Image: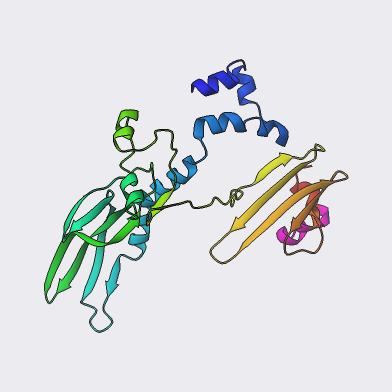
Amino acid sequence: MDVLAEEFGNLTPEQLAAPIPTVEEKWRLLPAFLKVKGLVKQHIDSFNYFINVEIKKIMKANEKVTSDADPMWYLKYLNIYVGLPDVEESFNVTRPVSPHECRLRDMTYSAPITVDIEYTRGSQRIIRNALPIGRMPIMLRSSNCVLTGKTPAEFAKLNECPLDPGGYFIVKGVEKVILIQEQLSKNRIIVEADRKGAVGASVTSSTHEKKSRTNMAVKQGRFYLRHNTLSEDIPIVIIFKVRLQVSTENYAEFLHF
């Protein structure tokens, strides 16, 4: 918040709430955004959401496995957990591990994945808790990382730099980064003005089957529709007539003119 006060403290509430008309003015927000959010926050937030929320949704979508030979025999996942990073020193004996140790010993900084399951054995219904099913690499500075919430003194004890932003993995002793893909928000209409002051709207529609992009532009005071399935721009009036089956006589009434 101190960074925001330093950057925008001289602006009134009305100025802060006012819309940003041009792309150039939007770029002026970038330095303040980077000071507050940093470059890797989206990586860490995405990973935290996956291990805390999304992985449970994936499990729920595939929670029950039924035998084809006997429908009465089934296995059902009740819950799933991603633990804290550890290393197995001997048979079934584990201990916590730090990122620095994984770098030195060419190990993967990973945590166990465990599940609670319910299954049938004859006429019995059996529940088993904390059953390990695999391991997952853990992103540094994520909610399951041992560095989360540590003080600079504790970072020094772990041989880590407190200025390291995290957001990467350690796989077999090597630091690995997942590259960012920049995409516009899907299924949301974005309206903005270009450098010439012309206002346009665009939306990227995405479903499980296909993805398309639709633009509406203004040319010589008229609205045109641009779509990736069309060879040329079409006046928006024609689209309304075709899609809504509005006659020419009732068109002005439809638009409330």
Residue at the image point whose x is 28% and y is 82% from the top: 68
Residue at the image point whose x is 29% and y is 72% from the top: 65
What secondary structure prevails in the magenta region? Answer: helix
Residue at the image point whose x is 71% and y is 46% from the top: 201
Tally of numbered tags: 0
Whether 183 is drawn above or below 3: the answer is below
Q: Is residue 55 left or right of residue 20?
A: left
Q: Nearer the viewer, residue 181 or 214?
A: 181
Residue 67: quadrant of the picture? bottom left
x and y percent of residue 146 in the render? Answer: 30, 42
x and y percent of residue 94 in the render? Answer: 19, 53
Q: Nearer the viewer, residue 71 or 129?
A: 129
Q: Is residue 247 magenta?
A: yes
Magenta stretch, residue numbers: 239-249
Q: Nearer the viewer, residue 129 or 103?
A: 103
Q: Is residue 46 left or right of residue 132?
A: right
